[in-house]
Structures are given as C-alpha cells and as structure tokens.
Image (cartoon, rainbow, N blue to C red):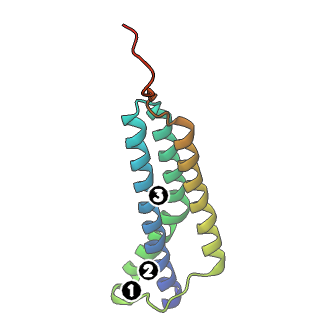
Amino acid sequence: MTKEHYLQMKKQARVWFTVNIIISLMAIAGGILVVISKSRHIPFLLMALGALTLMNQFLVTPAFNAKKEAEEEHPDWKVLSTKDTKITTENLQKGFLVSATALLIVIIGFFIFYRPFPTMGYQTKEMK
C-alpha cells in the first residue's frame, strides 16, 4: 500500500465514521420520540440498527481495517496529516449512496412508526 492510498483510507475512515455518528444520533433522537409517544418502537429500532449495520459493513469497517493494516506495516504513517488528501470519486459515490440509503431508512422508519399523542381540542369534553 502506498502512502497516498493509506492517507485516502485514513480520511475515508474518519469521514464515514463521522457520518455514521451523525446518522446514529438522528436515530437515537427519533427512537426517543417514538418511545415517548408510546408508538411501536421495536420495529423502528430494528430498522435503524439495520441501516447503521449496513453502513458500518460497507463503509466504516473496510476503510478502518485497511488503515489499521497499513499502520501495522508502517507505524510512522500514523502521524501523517490527511488535510490535503482527496477521497476518490468512486469511493465518494459509494459512500454517498450507502449513507443516503441509511439516512432514508432511518427517516422513513421514523415516519412509519411514530404516532404522536392524540390531542384534544379545547371544545372537546371528557366523558366520565
């Protein structure tokens, strides 16, 4: 593995991990809302978990493993900066597709399973 390829893998691992954390935070916020509203939270949490697992399996894990293998071969490369490194277009498109799919699964799952509390109008009287 060349130094340039290592820097690309290092940057990819960082970028996809950050995107994964952002989508995870959105899933957690949606999960909290679904649980608070006493909606069907288990299917939503399973959908969110599946989306994040998909993203981890196709983006984060391969980039992280390649980076880790290169760091074992060349320990001095750990200190290199990824500031001027560009992610290849092919990997960027693949990452965007998987990330967008995971985000859509989380958002669609939220809107499918979220049922807000029924609101009572001010003119509606409670029946006892």
Contact? badges 2 and 1 (CB < 8 Å): yes
Discs 3/2, front:
3
Q: Which residue is mark 1?
A: 74
Q: Quadrant of residue 78?
A: bottom left
| Residue 12 image position (x, y, % from top left) | 50, 75
Q: How far apart in space, not on screen, are marks 2 and 1 (Cα)?
A: 6 Å
Mark 3 or mark 1: name the one nearer the start of the chain: 3
Contact? badges 3 and 2 (CB < 8 Å): no
Contact? badges 3 and 1 (CB < 8 Å): no
For image coordinates 60% across by 60% down, the residue present is 100
- Amino acid under label 1? His
Q: How far apart in space, not on screen, are marks 3 and 1 (Cα)?
A: 32 Å
Q: Nearer the viewer, residue 116 or 84?
A: 116
Residue 19 numbered tag: none
Q: Which residue is mark 2?
A: 70
For image coordinates 48% across by 92% down, the residue present is 84
Q: Residues within 10 Å of mark 2 (few under 14, many from 20)?
A: many
Discs 3/1, front:
3
| Residue 119 image position (x, y, % from top left) | 44, 29
Q: At numbered mark 1, what does the secondary structure look like: helix, strand or loop? A: loop
The correct choice, above or below, for 50 with respect to 116 in the image is: below
Residue 23 numbered tag: 3
The correct choice, above or below, for 99 with respect to 106 in the image is: below
Q: Residue furthest bottom?
A: 84
